[in-house]
Image: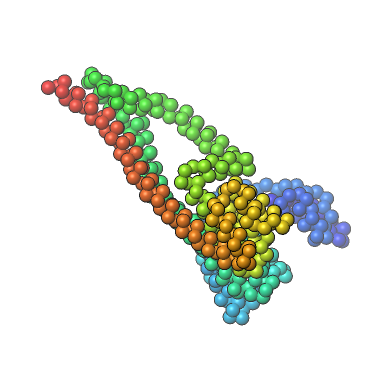
Amino acid sequence: MAYKYSAMDASSHVVSGYVDAGDEVAAEEALGQQGYRVLTLKAYRTAPTLKKLMPSFFRVKVGQIIIMSRQLAALLEAGIDIVAGIEILKEQAPSGSVKSLFDDMAKKLRAGNQLGAVLHQFPSVFPPTYVKMIEVGEQTGNIEGALRQASAYIEKQRDAGKKLSKALMYPSFVGGVAVVVVILLMVLVLPAMSGMFTSLGAELPLPTRMLMATSTFLKANILVLLLIIAAFGGFLYFRLRTLKGKRQLDGILLKVPVLGNIIIYTEIARFAGTVSTLLQSGVTVSASVESGASTCKNKIINEALEKAAKELLQGHGLSGPLSRAKLFPSMLVQMVRVGEETGSLNSTLSVVANAYETEVDERSQAMLAMLEPALTVAISVLVGFIAISVIMPIYSILGSIK
Protein backbone atom coordinates (compact mmCIF):
# COMPACT_ATOMS: atom_id res chain seq x y z
CA MET A 1 0.00 0.00 0.00
CA ALA A 2 1.22 3.52 -0.79
CA TYR A 3 1.69 6.15 1.94
CA LYS A 4 2.23 9.87 1.44
CA TYR A 5 4.71 11.29 3.91
CA SER A 6 6.43 14.44 4.97
CA ALA A 7 9.62 14.02 6.96
CA MET A 8 12.78 15.76 8.11
CA ASP A 9 16.06 14.53 6.66
CA ALA A 10 19.52 14.50 8.29
CA SER A 11 20.05 18.13 7.25
CA SER A 12 16.79 19.20 8.97
CA HIS A 13 15.15 19.84 5.60
CA VAL A 14 11.48 18.88 5.19
CA VAL A 15 10.96 16.45 2.35
CA SER A 16 7.84 14.70 1.08
CA GLY A 17 7.04 11.77 -1.14
CA TYR A 18 5.47 8.33 -1.31
CA VAL A 19 6.53 4.98 0.13
CA ASP A 20 5.11 1.47 -0.42
CA ALA A 21 4.68 -0.67 2.71
CA GLY A 22 2.35 -3.23 4.24
CA ASP A 23 1.15 -0.89 7.01
CA GLU A 24 2.00 2.40 8.75
CA VAL A 25 4.53 0.78 11.08
CA ALA A 26 6.41 -0.76 8.16
CA ALA A 27 6.28 2.57 6.31
CA GLU A 28 7.80 4.42 9.30
CA GLU A 29 10.52 1.77 9.63
CA ALA A 30 11.37 2.05 5.93
CA LEU A 31 11.62 5.84 6.16
CA GLY A 32 13.66 5.60 9.37
CA GLN A 33 16.18 3.35 7.62
CA GLN A 34 16.60 6.10 5.01
CA GLY A 35 17.47 8.59 7.76
CA TYR A 36 14.10 10.38 7.80
CA ARG A 37 12.18 11.51 10.88
CA VAL A 38 8.49 11.21 9.97
CA LEU A 39 6.29 14.26 10.49
CA THR A 40 3.07 13.13 8.79
CA LEU A 41 2.07 9.84 7.23
CA LYS A 42 -1.22 9.16 5.43
CA ALA A 43 -2.49 6.29 3.32
CA TYR A 44 -2.56 7.29 -0.33
CA ARG A 45 -5.31 5.62 -2.30
CA THR A 46 -5.22 5.67 -6.07
CA ALA A 47 -7.76 4.48 -8.61
CA PRO A 48 -7.42 0.73 -9.17
CA THR A 49 -5.31 -0.11 -12.18
CA LEU A 50 -6.19 -2.70 -14.81
CA LYS A 51 -3.47 -4.92 -13.31
CA LYS A 52 -5.16 -4.83 -9.90
CA LEU A 53 -8.65 -5.36 -11.32
CA MET A 54 -7.64 -8.34 -13.47
CA PRO A 55 -4.46 -9.77 -11.94
CA SER A 56 -4.80 -13.12 -13.72
CA PHE A 57 -4.12 -11.43 -17.08
CA PHE A 58 -0.82 -10.02 -15.78
CA ARG A 59 0.30 -12.94 -13.62
CA VAL A 60 3.61 -14.61 -14.41
CA LYS A 61 2.70 -18.14 -15.50
CA VAL A 62 4.26 -21.29 -14.09
CA GLY A 63 5.51 -22.28 -17.54
CA GLN A 64 7.47 -19.02 -17.77
CA ILE A 65 9.11 -19.71 -14.41
CA ILE A 66 10.10 -23.20 -15.56
CA ILE A 67 11.71 -21.84 -18.74
CA MET A 68 13.39 -19.01 -16.82
CA SER A 69 14.90 -21.45 -14.31
CA ARG A 70 16.39 -23.66 -16.98
CA GLN A 71 17.70 -20.77 -19.05
CA LEU A 72 19.25 -19.09 -16.02
CA ALA A 73 20.92 -22.39 -15.03
CA ALA A 74 22.39 -22.68 -18.54
CA LEU A 75 23.68 -19.08 -18.42
CA LEU A 76 25.31 -19.64 -15.02
CA GLU A 77 26.94 -22.85 -16.26
CA ALA A 78 28.35 -20.84 -19.19
CA GLY A 79 30.15 -18.55 -16.73
CA ILE A 80 27.78 -15.56 -16.85
CA ASP A 81 27.14 -13.92 -13.47
CA ILE A 82 23.61 -13.99 -12.08
CA VAL A 83 22.81 -10.28 -12.57
CA ALA A 84 23.90 -10.37 -16.21
CA GLY A 85 21.93 -13.58 -16.66
CA ILE A 86 18.75 -11.94 -15.35
CA GLU A 87 19.34 -8.97 -17.67
CA ILE A 88 19.67 -11.30 -20.67
CA LEU A 89 16.43 -13.06 -19.72
CA LYS A 90 14.69 -9.68 -19.36
CA GLU A 91 15.66 -8.70 -22.90
CA GLN A 92 14.05 -11.82 -24.38
CA ALA A 93 11.06 -11.93 -22.01
CA PRO A 94 7.78 -12.47 -23.93
CA SER A 95 5.53 -10.22 -21.83
CA GLY A 96 5.57 -7.01 -19.84
CA SER A 97 4.84 -8.73 -16.54
CA VAL A 98 7.86 -11.02 -16.95
CA LYS A 99 10.10 -8.10 -17.97
CA SER A 100 8.93 -6.19 -14.89
CA LEU A 101 9.69 -9.20 -12.68
CA PHE A 102 13.22 -9.57 -14.07
CA ASP A 103 13.83 -5.83 -13.78
CA ASP A 104 12.85 -5.87 -10.07
CA MET A 105 14.98 -8.96 -9.48
CA ALA A 106 18.03 -7.38 -11.15
CA LYS A 107 17.71 -4.22 -9.03
CA LYS A 108 17.52 -6.21 -5.80
CA LEU A 109 20.46 -8.42 -6.82
CA ARG A 110 22.59 -5.36 -7.60
CA ALA A 111 21.80 -4.07 -4.11
CA GLY A 112 23.69 -7.08 -2.73
CA ASN A 113 20.83 -9.50 -2.03
CA GLN A 114 21.21 -13.20 -2.73
CA LEU A 115 18.88 -14.86 -5.21
CA GLY A 116 16.97 -16.79 -2.52
CA ALA A 117 16.29 -13.60 -0.55
CA VAL A 118 15.10 -11.87 -3.73
CA LEU A 119 12.75 -14.71 -4.64
CA HIS A 120 11.23 -14.51 -1.13
CA GLN A 121 9.93 -11.05 -2.05
CA PHE A 122 7.74 -12.48 -4.86
CA PRO A 123 5.58 -15.08 -3.03
CA SER A 124 2.84 -14.97 -5.68
CA VAL A 125 5.35 -16.03 -8.36
CA PHE A 126 7.79 -18.40 -6.66
CA PRO A 127 6.40 -21.16 -4.37
CA PRO A 128 8.05 -21.52 -0.93
CA THR A 129 9.43 -24.95 -1.83
CA TYR A 130 11.05 -23.51 -4.96
CA VAL A 131 12.66 -20.72 -2.93
CA LYS A 132 13.93 -23.12 -0.27
CA MET A 133 15.59 -25.29 -2.91
CA ILE A 134 17.35 -22.25 -4.39
CA GLU A 135 18.55 -21.18 -0.93
CA VAL A 136 20.02 -24.65 -0.33
CA GLY A 137 21.70 -24.46 -3.74
CA GLU A 138 23.31 -21.16 -2.74
CA GLN A 139 24.55 -22.63 0.54
CA THR A 140 26.07 -25.67 -1.18
CA GLY A 141 27.48 -23.72 -4.13
CA ASN A 142 25.34 -25.60 -6.67
CA ILE A 143 22.77 -23.00 -7.65
CA GLU A 144 22.67 -24.26 -11.26
CA GLY A 145 21.64 -27.73 -10.14
CA ALA A 146 19.14 -26.24 -7.68
CA LEU A 147 17.52 -24.21 -10.48
CA ARG A 148 17.12 -27.31 -12.65
CA GLN A 149 15.77 -29.36 -9.76
CA ALA A 150 13.35 -26.61 -8.73
CA SER A 151 12.06 -26.21 -12.29
CA ALA A 152 11.52 -29.98 -12.54
CA TYR A 153 9.61 -29.91 -9.25
CA ILE A 154 7.15 -27.15 -10.18
CA GLU A 155 6.71 -28.65 -13.66
CA LYS A 156 5.68 -31.93 -12.09
CA GLN A 157 3.26 -30.14 -9.75
CA ARG A 158 1.77 -28.19 -12.67
CA ASP A 159 1.29 -31.29 -14.83
CA ALA A 160 -0.41 -33.14 -11.97
CA GLY A 161 -2.93 -30.32 -11.61
CA LYS A 162 -3.60 -30.17 -15.34
CA LYS A 163 -4.62 -33.83 -15.60
CA LEU A 164 -7.79 -33.53 -13.54
CA SER A 165 -8.67 -30.13 -15.06
CA LYS A 166 -8.52 -31.56 -18.57
CA ALA A 167 -10.54 -34.60 -17.56
CA LEU A 168 -13.29 -32.43 -16.05
CA MET A 169 -13.45 -30.07 -19.02
CA TYR A 170 -15.82 -32.15 -21.16
CA PRO A 171 -18.39 -33.00 -18.43
CA SER A 172 -18.37 -29.39 -17.25
CA PHE A 173 -18.94 -28.07 -20.77
CA VAL A 174 -21.78 -30.50 -21.49
CA GLY A 175 -23.46 -29.82 -18.16
CA GLY A 176 -23.16 -26.05 -18.59
CA VAL A 177 -24.62 -26.10 -22.11
CA ALA A 178 -27.50 -28.31 -20.96
CA VAL A 179 -28.38 -25.94 -18.11
CA VAL A 180 -28.33 -22.88 -20.41
CA VAL A 181 -30.50 -24.61 -23.06
CA VAL A 182 -33.08 -25.76 -20.50
CA ILE A 183 -33.32 -22.28 -18.96
CA LEU A 184 -33.82 -20.68 -22.39
CA LEU A 185 -36.53 -23.20 -23.24
CA MET A 186 -38.31 -22.65 -19.93
CA VAL A 187 -38.15 -18.86 -20.01
CA LEU A 188 -38.49 -17.99 -23.73
CA VAL A 189 -39.95 -20.87 -25.75
CA LEU A 190 -42.45 -22.61 -23.47
CA PRO A 191 -44.42 -19.48 -22.42
CA ALA A 192 -45.19 -18.78 -26.11
CA MET A 193 -46.32 -22.38 -26.69
CA SER A 194 -48.41 -22.27 -23.53
CA GLY A 195 -50.38 -19.33 -24.95
CA MET A 196 -50.95 -21.25 -28.18
CA PHE A 197 -52.21 -24.35 -26.34
CA THR A 198 -54.57 -22.28 -24.20
CA SER A 199 -56.03 -20.39 -27.19
CA LEU A 200 -56.77 -23.69 -28.98
CA GLY A 201 -58.54 -25.07 -25.93
CA ALA A 202 -56.36 -28.16 -25.73
CA GLU A 203 -56.53 -30.29 -22.60
CA LEU A 204 -53.02 -30.30 -21.22
CA PRO A 205 -51.66 -33.55 -19.77
CA LEU A 206 -50.01 -33.61 -16.33
CA PRO A 207 -46.37 -33.42 -17.57
CA THR A 208 -47.21 -30.39 -19.68
CA ARG A 209 -49.04 -28.66 -16.81
CA MET A 210 -46.05 -29.29 -14.54
CA LEU A 211 -43.66 -27.89 -17.10
CA MET A 212 -45.84 -24.85 -17.83
CA ALA A 213 -46.20 -24.10 -14.13
CA THR A 214 -42.45 -24.25 -13.69
CA SER A 215 -41.91 -22.06 -16.74
CA THR A 216 -44.46 -19.49 -15.53
CA PHE A 217 -42.84 -19.40 -12.10
CA LEU A 218 -39.36 -18.92 -13.56
CA LYS A 219 -40.48 -16.15 -15.91
CA ALA A 220 -42.35 -14.30 -13.17
CA ASN A 221 -39.58 -14.55 -10.59
CA ILE A 222 -36.43 -14.66 -12.70
CA LEU A 223 -34.98 -11.45 -11.23
CA VAL A 224 -35.71 -12.53 -7.66
CA LEU A 225 -34.16 -15.93 -8.31
CA LEU A 226 -31.07 -14.35 -9.86
CA LEU A 227 -30.71 -12.06 -6.84
CA ILE A 228 -31.05 -15.02 -4.48
CA ILE A 229 -28.44 -16.99 -6.43
CA ALA A 230 -26.10 -13.97 -6.49
CA ALA A 231 -26.58 -13.38 -2.75
CA PHE A 232 -25.96 -17.05 -1.98
CA GLY A 233 -22.89 -17.06 -4.22
CA GLY A 234 -21.57 -13.93 -2.49
CA PHE A 235 -22.17 -15.49 0.92
CA LEU A 236 -20.28 -18.64 -0.10
CA TYR A 237 -17.46 -16.59 -1.59
CA PHE A 238 -16.85 -14.58 1.57
CA ARG A 239 -17.52 -17.56 3.83
CA LEU A 240 -14.90 -19.64 2.06
CA ARG A 241 -12.38 -16.83 2.45
CA THR A 242 -12.53 -17.36 6.22
CA LEU A 243 -10.52 -20.07 7.94
CA LYS A 244 -13.62 -21.62 9.51
CA GLY A 245 -15.52 -21.72 6.22
CA LYS A 246 -12.56 -23.22 4.34
CA ARG A 247 -12.13 -25.88 7.02
CA GLN A 248 -15.84 -26.78 6.91
CA LEU A 249 -15.88 -27.15 3.12
CA ASP A 250 -12.67 -29.20 3.08
CA GLY A 251 -14.07 -31.46 5.80
CA ILE A 252 -17.24 -32.06 3.77
CA LEU A 253 -15.26 -32.81 0.60
CA LEU A 254 -13.22 -35.46 2.42
CA LYS A 255 -16.44 -37.29 3.31
CA VAL A 256 -17.78 -37.41 -0.25
CA PRO A 257 -17.56 -40.99 -1.61
CA VAL A 258 -14.80 -41.53 -4.20
CA LEU A 259 -13.92 -37.81 -4.30
CA GLY A 260 -12.74 -37.82 -0.68
CA ASN A 261 -10.17 -40.54 -1.33
CA ILE A 262 -8.96 -38.81 -4.49
CA ILE A 263 -8.37 -35.61 -2.48
CA ILE A 264 -6.47 -37.47 0.26
CA TYR A 265 -4.31 -39.36 -2.24
CA THR A 266 -3.61 -36.16 -4.19
CA GLU A 267 -2.48 -34.34 -1.06
CA ILE A 268 -0.33 -37.29 0.05
CA ALA A 269 1.36 -37.44 -3.35
CA ARG A 270 2.04 -33.68 -3.25
CA PHE A 271 3.33 -33.83 0.34
CA ALA A 272 5.53 -36.89 -0.20
CA GLY A 273 6.94 -35.55 -3.48
CA THR A 274 7.78 -32.18 -1.92
CA VAL A 275 9.46 -33.67 1.15
CA SER A 276 11.43 -36.15 -0.98
CA THR A 277 12.64 -33.39 -3.31
CA LEU A 278 13.70 -31.13 -0.44
CA LEU A 279 15.50 -33.95 1.36
CA GLN A 280 17.35 -34.71 -1.86
CA SER A 281 18.33 -31.03 -2.06
CA GLY A 282 19.86 -31.16 1.42
CA VAL A 283 17.07 -29.54 3.46
CA THR A 284 16.60 -30.87 7.00
CA VAL A 285 13.80 -33.35 7.70
CA SER A 286 11.84 -30.95 9.94
CA ALA A 287 12.04 -28.08 7.41
CA SER A 288 11.14 -30.44 4.55
CA VAL A 289 8.07 -31.78 6.37
CA GLU A 290 6.99 -28.26 7.28
CA SER A 291 7.29 -27.12 3.66
CA GLY A 292 5.53 -30.27 2.44
CA ALA A 293 2.61 -29.56 4.77
CA SER A 294 2.31 -26.00 3.44
CA THR A 295 1.78 -27.31 -0.12
CA CYS A 296 -1.43 -29.16 0.86
CA LYS A 297 -4.50 -27.18 -0.17
CA ASN A 298 -7.07 -29.10 1.91
CA LYS A 299 -7.15 -27.36 5.31
CA ILE A 300 -7.93 -30.53 7.30
CA ILE A 301 -4.97 -32.40 5.82
CA ASN A 302 -2.77 -29.31 6.03
CA GLU A 303 -3.44 -28.91 9.77
CA ALA A 304 -2.84 -32.63 10.41
CA LEU A 305 0.53 -32.48 8.65
CA GLU A 306 1.50 -29.23 10.39
CA LYS A 307 0.76 -30.92 13.72
CA ALA A 308 2.92 -33.87 12.65
CA ALA A 309 5.73 -31.44 11.77
CA LYS A 310 5.57 -29.90 15.27
CA GLU A 311 5.65 -33.34 16.91
CA LEU A 312 8.60 -34.23 14.70
CA LEU A 313 10.53 -31.28 16.14
CA GLN A 314 9.73 -32.61 19.63
CA GLY A 315 11.42 -35.90 18.77
CA HIS A 316 8.33 -38.04 18.07
CA GLY A 317 9.33 -38.98 14.53
CA LEU A 318 6.97 -38.69 11.58
CA SER A 319 5.22 -42.06 11.32
CA GLY A 320 3.79 -41.84 14.84
CA PRO A 321 2.05 -38.47 14.39
CA LEU A 322 0.73 -39.55 10.97
CA SER A 323 -0.75 -42.70 12.52
CA ARG A 324 -2.39 -40.78 15.38
CA ALA A 325 -4.03 -38.35 12.94
CA LYS A 326 -6.46 -41.16 11.87
CA LEU A 327 -6.62 -39.55 8.45
CA PHE A 328 -3.89 -41.12 6.35
CA PRO A 329 -3.79 -44.61 4.78
CA SER A 330 -1.83 -47.29 6.64
CA MET A 331 0.40 -47.72 3.58
CA LEU A 332 1.75 -44.19 4.03
CA VAL A 333 2.36 -44.70 7.74
CA GLN A 334 4.13 -48.03 7.20
CA MET A 335 6.31 -46.69 4.38
CA VAL A 336 7.34 -43.66 6.43
CA ARG A 337 8.15 -45.92 9.39
CA VAL A 338 10.34 -48.12 7.18
CA GLY A 339 12.07 -45.03 5.74
CA GLU A 340 12.80 -43.70 9.24
CA GLU A 341 14.14 -47.02 10.49
CA THR A 342 16.38 -47.62 7.47
CA GLY A 343 17.49 -43.99 7.06
CA SER A 344 16.08 -43.87 3.52
CA LEU A 345 13.12 -41.52 4.04
CA ASN A 346 14.02 -39.60 0.87
CA SER A 347 13.76 -42.58 -1.50
CA THR A 348 10.82 -44.08 0.42
CA LEU A 349 8.75 -40.91 0.09
CA SER A 350 9.65 -40.74 -3.61
CA VAL A 351 8.16 -44.22 -4.03
CA VAL A 352 5.08 -43.16 -2.02
CA ALA A 353 4.60 -40.06 -4.19
CA ASN A 354 4.78 -42.05 -7.44
CA ALA A 355 2.43 -44.74 -6.09
CA TYR A 356 -0.24 -42.28 -5.01
CA GLU A 357 0.06 -40.24 -8.20
CA THR A 358 -0.72 -43.41 -10.13
CA GLU A 359 -3.60 -44.16 -7.75
CA VAL A 360 -5.02 -40.67 -8.24
CA ASP A 361 -4.87 -41.02 -12.04
CA GLU A 362 -6.65 -44.38 -11.97
CA ARG A 363 -9.35 -43.29 -9.53
CA SER A 364 -9.93 -39.99 -11.35
CA GLN A 365 -10.36 -41.78 -14.66
CA ALA A 366 -12.73 -44.29 -13.04
CA MET A 367 -14.80 -41.49 -11.48
CA LEU A 368 -15.01 -39.64 -14.78
CA ALA A 369 -15.89 -42.87 -16.59
CA MET A 370 -18.91 -43.12 -14.28
CA LEU A 371 -19.71 -39.41 -14.42
CA GLU A 372 -19.96 -39.06 -18.20
CA PRO A 373 -22.68 -41.70 -18.79
CA ALA A 374 -24.55 -40.54 -15.68
CA LEU A 375 -24.49 -36.98 -17.01
CA THR A 376 -25.64 -38.17 -20.44
CA VAL A 377 -28.56 -40.11 -18.93
CA ALA A 378 -29.61 -37.16 -16.75
CA ILE A 379 -29.58 -34.75 -19.70
CA SER A 380 -31.43 -37.26 -21.88
CA VAL A 381 -34.16 -37.72 -19.25
CA LEU A 382 -34.57 -33.97 -18.82
CA VAL A 383 -34.69 -33.25 -22.56
CA GLY A 384 -37.00 -36.22 -23.10
CA PHE A 385 -39.40 -34.96 -20.43
CA ILE A 386 -39.51 -31.51 -22.05
CA ALA A 387 -40.04 -33.03 -25.50
CA ILE A 388 -42.88 -35.28 -24.32
CA SER A 389 -44.51 -32.39 -22.46
CA VAL A 390 -44.55 -30.35 -25.69
CA ILE A 391 -45.53 -33.14 -28.11
CA MET A 392 -48.42 -34.60 -26.08
CA PRO A 393 -50.69 -31.51 -26.30
CA ILE A 394 -49.87 -31.17 -30.03
CA TYR A 395 -51.22 -34.70 -30.62
CA SER A 396 -54.24 -33.83 -28.47
CA ILE A 397 -54.95 -30.76 -30.64
CA LEU A 398 -54.58 -32.74 -33.87
CA GLY A 399 -56.98 -35.41 -32.53
CA SER A 400 -59.62 -32.82 -31.68
CA ILE A 401 -59.37 -31.31 -35.20
CA LYS A 402 -60.12 -34.71 -36.78
- State the count of labels: 0
Whether residue 370 is visible here, answered yes or no, is: yes
85 shown above or below 388: below
Q: Quadrant of residue 93?
A: bottom right
Which residue extends farthest right? 12
The C terminus sits in image quarter: top left
Which residue extends farthest bottom? 79
Residue 206, position in %: x, y? 29, 23
> Residue at the spot x=50%, y=57% of the render?
356
Left or right? Give the position of 283 relative to 260: right
> Residue at the spot x=23%, y=30% of the render?
391
Left or right? Give the position of 331 relative to 368: right
Q: Quadrant of residue 397?
A: top left
Residue 242, position in %: x, y? 62, 41
The image's colour scheme reads rainbow
Which residue extends farthest left? 402
> Residue at the spot x=59%, y=79% of the render?
77
Residue 273, position in %: x, y? 56, 61
115 shown above or below 56: below
Whether residue 104 is visible here, answered yes or no, is: no
Residue 70, position in %: x, y? 55, 71
Left or right? Give the position of 214 relative to 1: left
Left or right? Give the position of 21 relative to 238: right
Q: Quadrant of residue 235?
A: top right
> Residue at the spot x=66%, y=66% of the render?
283
